[in-house]
Amino acid sequence: MRLGRAEIARQLFEGMPDALVVADRAGIIRHWNGGAERIFGFAEDEALGRSLDIITPERLRARHWRGYETTMRTGHTKYGAGDLLAVPALRKDGAQISIQFSIVPLRDAEGALQAIAAIMRDVTEDFEDRKRLRRALREAEG
């Protein structure tokens, strides 16, 4: 039996361990998969219809929204295909985590930017390990 594109897309969206979050032009969450629920702690019904502010640390929100609004207005992002970004994010319980993510601009049939999909992975443990190693290296050198 062959799987069609729609079935492959559905299974990827529902089953991937990474977070897949789609936000519309206004930054409102429109799609939230199980990976997002696992990483951020918000159930799908808690996240859908809410602003990306629920996962963006307050100190970074102004910068985030400037970039987001510029991308939506111009249709271009400074983060090209394959770029992996690393930023702090928030969990539902208020804990700050480190995530790496890439984005996919979603366009309509005429090519106008309508939404942004972000594929995110929690890299908090790796980030903390690198911090400990750098600190140990500084202490050993110093």
Image: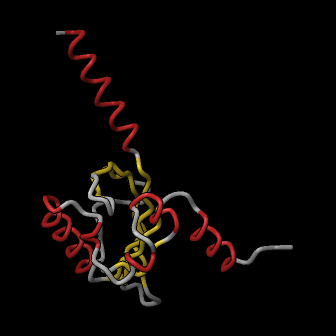
Place of residue 31 in the rendered image (x, y in percent of width and height, measured from the top left): 45, 78
Callout count: 0
Q: Residue at x 46, y 65 (%)?
A: 37
Q: Quadrant of the C terminus?
A: top left
Please indicate whether residue 60 sits to the left or right of residue 126 in the image: left
Find the residue positioned furthest to the front: 93
Q: Residue at x 45, y 75 (%)?
A: 44
Residue in front for this viewpoint, 3 or 42 = 42
Find the residue positioned furthest to the bottom: 110
Relative height, residue 49 to residue 54 (above, below): below
Residue in front for this viewpoint, 27 or 78 = 27
Relative height, residue 15 to residue 89 (above, below): below
- Splitting the image into 4 quarters, where does residue 93 fall? bottom left
Q: Quadrant of the N terminus?
A: bottom right
- Splitting the image into 4 quarters, where does residue 128 fall? top left
Place of residue 79 in the rendered image (x, y in percent of width and height, measured from the top left): 32, 59
Residue in front for this viewpoint, 45 or 138 = 45
Place of residue 16 in the rendered image (x, y in percent of width and height, measured from the top left): 58, 61
Find the residue positioned furthest to the top: 141
Q: Residue at x 25, y 63 (%)?
A: 56
What coloring was used for the rendering? secondary structure
Place of residue 94 in the rendered image (x, y in percent of width and height, measured from the top left): 26, 58
